[in-house]
Amino acid sequence: MSFLRGSANFVWCTTSVLGKGATGAVFQGVNKNNGEPVAVKTFNQVSHMRPHDVQMREFEVLRKVKHENIVKLLAIEEEQDGRGKVIVMELCTGGSLFNILDDPENTYGLAEEEFLLVLEHLSAGMKHLRDNNLVHRDLKPGNIMKFISDDGSTIYKLTDFGAARELQEDQQFVSLYGTEEYLHPDMYERAVLRKPVGKSFGATVDLWSIGVTLYHVATGQLPFRPYGGRRNRETMFYITTKKASGVIAGAQTSEGGPIDWSRELPASCPLSAGLKRYVTPLLAGLLEVDQQKIWSFDRFFSRVTDTLCRRPAVNIFDVHGVNLIKIYLHPDEEKFAAFQAHVQDQTNIPSRSQILLKGQVPILQLIEESTPGRGYPLTSIDEPLFLYSRENNNVVIPSETELPKFPVFASLVSVETDASQAKSACSVGHECKRRIDKIARCSKLSQDAVNAFVGYLTTELNKALDKSQRAKDFTKAIEDLAISVERGESIARQVFLNIRANQGSAATSSMGSTGTNLSSSAPSSTLPSFEMKSWKKELDNKSKELFGDLAPAITQLYQRYVRENSLKSEWDSNTRELWCPWAGKASQRASKLVDRLRDGWQHLLRDRATRSLTYNDEQFHVLERIKVTETGHRMKELLEKQAIPAITQRSDCLADWYKMAQTVFLQSQILDKDMDNYDRVLETFSLRLSQESKERYDMVCRMLDSWLPTVGKQLGKGSNKSQSELDERKKRRAIMEEGKWKDICSVQEQILLVLYKNEKLVEELSRCVLDEKEDSKSSSTENLQMLATSN
């Protein structure tokens, strides 16, 4: 019997079966012209018994569709021996999604990135069908193929359009197609239960099938599971039709037992809590039976677009849960407040308490609060953001679900049962490996989180020390200014006292010689009393906080935690004797053990294919069972006796360490705020000093301006000099008034310059007064001599 069959341009072997269905089979073939591998679909007698228009429907649909996520049609040819037409398609070497889910690695569902890829490609393929008014009517994992492109990327493609047909959104059909686990309940009632229900169906029946498929992809199991599976069909129908709105799963665990309803994905599902937030309502909408609440395709496509646009997720390592979380942020609509709300939902850390670092840098130094999701820095599971709490210093590892038990082989050899048990052992082994990988990564990230927080604290303490030094320098500058102001005011006060004294002396001399009272012509109101202010003393009182409390405290923190690096030393000391799953290569060891389990499973699968074993083959079979059992024990021991205790010990050390680190952080924050308050107080004092000293200087100038002309008239000399000094002083005042003090430093410089010039002016005035006094004395002496001579 020949297994080789062909058409004009293709040849295939009937032993290379890729898949079988109710109406035909798919084989792997080869293009005769270029040697390229292809997939060839042939049809059986059941297919040929269908009406001719139904037979031609699949050919017409394949000719009509052309999309990346739909298997490409290469040719439709006649088989050479007259068996009918065959469909030649591109070969998807990754196999069907059903086979992928059947692999022990995916017993509990696909990994998150792979699930999102399936969701994206499945919805894209379905949108192309709906754009062409087509309904598939047999959507399931077996009809979704994995294509590996030339660049190694994965593309999932829809295939098997034997049940597909054209159908408008508002049209109905009555024919029955599909696989019962994925059928809409209304179709299930007619097709499986054979009830004569006069119902027609719309295109939305594909949505139910998509919902069941996506649940299967996410969890590795079907959403609706009666006890006994397909043989319990009435219960299956009851579960799908009696479930409440929003329920996405129902399982019966015993014969005639109650149904366990669920509105959430199971804990064993590998999807992150961040993604479940969007996938769960998506599944609830797809698995809706209430006609008033059933989704449309447009709503499905819109919800998928909203979910997919949130990629890539923001990865965050929660220090207090020793756990990696994912935040799916909308690229345009959600900003920092929404981001913090997502974080709070998953960690229970309030927004006000969240400390988020990218490396050693606070996230708000990289983005603004108004930055949308697309502007956030890229992260990965190995380089996430680090999350700490300002208020909570506890570290609690979230509890995992109970690990499935490794199966125990029966004492008697059974090739059928042993292969099944070995597959179950592989499934448990892969679950162990996932948990070990998670523990190993979290042990590394806990170390990275410590380093990041130490670096952040170092930066903050450096800033605090710089701020303290600047405050000291600023205080010293203000102190110098205050001393200069006080000195200038002291000189001004002394000048006024001398002027008063000289006025009195000059007036007495003038009265004796001329009989004129000069003091009466210079009213005392022009020379009021001049009170000095104690600027230096006031500044000393204000700076006691800086020099007595703040600066020493900052210096102490800096010395201990920056120069001596006490926090890092404390962590290293506490964890030095602990085994680190990451450094100990726990993940690599787990991978090796999983490979051994899979080798044993493949060996037992080959034994099952042979059906009967020779004595020698049976002995090797038994040895493989022993290897699988022992490897399972080693895997479980690696997880439960090494990895879990190690991460528990490290989390305890992390909790103790963070209590110290949090205290240092809060101290640095308090000192930083105190320094800001001191800076504000000092700036206020400096501004008041500058303004009041300027006002007092202006007052001195006005007093002198009003006094000098009077003195010149009274003394009868030096009027030109006084007037020139007055003009010069007015010019200086005009120049000062034109200048605008832009900042405190420039104000200080101007005041110092004014005080210097003021001192010079005071010296000139003092000399002027002394000269007048000497002149008065000389005049009196001459008068007395003249009187004596005349006598």
Image (cartoon, rainbow, N blue to C red):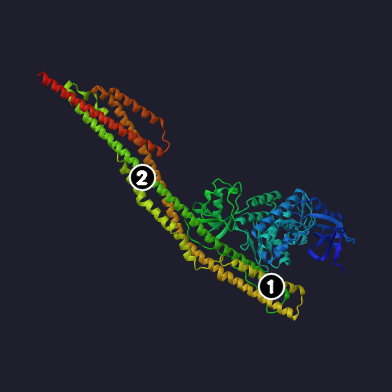
Residue at point 61%, 65% (across, down)? 434
Disc 2 marks which amino acid?
Lys
Where does the image place residue 197, in percent across and percent down from the top left? 77, 57
The N terminus lies in quadrant: bottom right
Seen as rendered, the residue at the extreme front is: 789
Label 1: how many Cα within 10 Å (few below 14, some 14–19, many 20+): many
Pinpoint residue 161: horizontal percent, then vertical percent.
79, 56
Say the numbered circle drawn on residue 600.
Answer: 1
Q: Secondary structure at mark 2?
A: helix
Q: Is residue 428 visible?
A: no
For the image, the number of numbered tags is 2
**Residue, far top:** 790
Left or right, 347 with reference to 469 = right
Numbered tag placed on residue 261 in the rendering: none
Along the viewing direction, whichever of 117 and 583 lies nearer the viewer: 583
Q: Which mark is residue 476?
A: 2
- In this rendering, does residue 510 appear at all? yes
User: Which residue is painted at 71% across and 66% down in the image?
Assistant: 229
1 or 2: mark nearer the eye: 2
Compared across the picture, whether 768 is left or right of 648 comes to left
* Residue 48 at x, y percent in the picture: 86, 60
Q: CA distance from mark 1 to mark 2?
A: 80 Å
Picture quarter containing residue 680?
Answer: top left
